[in-house]
Image (spheres, helix red, strand yellow):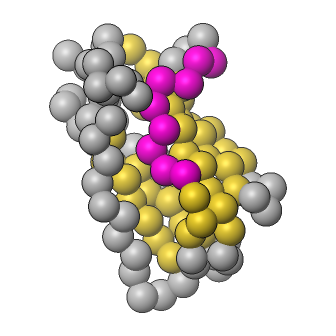
Amino acid sequence: VEVSVFRRQASNPTVFSLDGATPNPFNPSTTIWFDVPEPTRITLNVYNVLGQEVAKLAEGFHAPGRYSVTWNGRDSHGITLASGVYLYRITSATGFKNTRRMVLLK
């Protein structure tokens, strides 16, 4: 899985959020932005429509800020995934959870 370096902006958000992937549909990669308003542990995973985890995009402690991660449509073993609908889900240790949908087109 190719993951970009997270970028954090100077201003801190006031609420958790998970933005839509851009572009969406995508090929060969898409960027996902999320906001963290307080220090906490974050996980951001990608799932297929059967609910199976295919990639882990972020895991660990995050300070308050706005972050991005770029996903290249590959699974955790580096295998290019098939065209289709994928779900990405963020969870925080503080209880925030959100899931959104993206489409990989070849």
Residue drawn 54% across the image and 83% down it: 12
Picture quadrant of residue 72: top left
Question: Which residue is farthest bottom?
Answer: 10
> Please, what is the dominant secondary structure of the magenta stretch?
strand
| Residue 103 image position (x, y, % from top left) | 38, 25
**Relative to 20, 69 lies left or right:** left
Looking at the image, which is closer to me, 70 or 17?
70
Residue 51 shows in this picture: yes
| Residue 85 image position (x, y, % from top left) | 44, 19
Picture quadrant of residue 55: top left
Which quadrant holds the C terminus? top left
Question: Which residue is farthest front?
Answer: 77
**Relative to 93, 8 lies left or right:** left
In the image, is residue 56 above or below residue 97?
Answer: above
Does residue 105 show up magenta in the picture? no
In the image, is residue 61 above or below residue 88?
Answer: below
What residue range appears in magenta? 51-59
| Residue 51 image position (x, y, % from top left) | 62, 18
Residue drawn 26% across the image and 19% down it: 80
Question: Which residue is farthest right?
Answer: 95
| Residue 30 image position (x, y, % from top left) | 29, 41
Picture quadrant of residue 14: bottom right
Does residue 58 show up magenta in the picture? yes
